[in-house]
Amino acid sequence: MKFTFSPLHLLPFLFFLLFPSFNCSAQSKFGHVDYSAIITNMPGIDSIQNVINDYVSDLQIINNQMEKEFEEKQIALENLSKSANISQAILKLKQDELLAMYKRIQEFKQSAQNDIQDKQVELLEPFQTKLSEAVKKIAKINKYNYVFDISVLLYYTLGDDLTDKVKAELGIK
């Protein structure tokens, strides 16, 4: 009699290997929180929006000044190009200056956008840390193995909503 090896022969062995992990997952506790509902109601979070708005406003003023200067130079170039006595070398020089200014404005806008995002991250970090610590504390006290943010879950039937407990821990009503 000849014995041939088949992957099906491994099935009973794999079942016994995996059985303890099924047993552990059956004992796991799952919870979830509404992260955005908590963080948007944390004391002091509204002041961040005011700081960001002021920061954006300052950058917008500089951007507006740059765009106004660009428009003025563009109009001057258009008027200069209508002149019969203008040399092509001067016209080319002015066009190159205008193009360089346009590129600087675009670079400023991109840099400003990055600065705004960095400022938001910097200002939100203490709130996120505080929220994360509160979630960990509630999870440990109530013996949860996993706590998820509901905004990233597509479907769930098991688990407890810990949002109110975390809010209470943070002093949010």
Image (cartoon, rainbow, N blue to C red):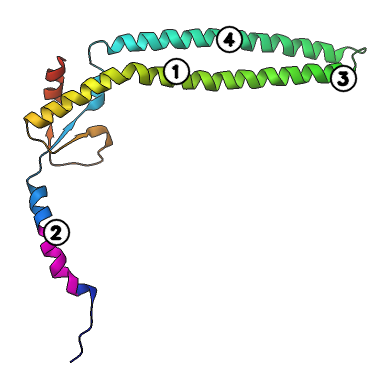
Which numbered marker is on residue 30? none
2 vs 3, front mark: 2
Q: Earlier in the sequence, mark 3 or mark 1?
A: 3
**Nearer mark to the viewer, of 4 and 2:** 2
Question: Hey, which residue is sitting farthest bottom in the picture?
Answer: 1
- Residue 169, image x, y percentages: 12, 19
Does 140 sit above or below residue 64? below
**Residue 34: quarter of image:** top left
The reply to whether discs 2 and 3 touch (Cβ–Cβ < 8 Å) is no
Going by the numbered disc 3, the residue's amino acid type is Ala
Q: Which one is earlier in the sequence, the residue at label 1 or at label 2? A: 2
Residue named by callout 4: 64
Q: Which residue is mark 3?
A: 89
Label 4 packing within 10 angstroms: few (<14), some (14-19), many (20+): few
Q: Magenta segment: does it hold 72?
A: no
Amino acid under label 1?
Answer: Ile
Direction from residue 127 to residue 137 in the image, left or right: left
Quadrant of residue 168 in the image? top left
Range of residues picked out in magenta: 9-19
Q: Secondary structure at mark 3?
A: helix
- Identify the residue under disc 2: 18
Badge 2 amino acid? Leu
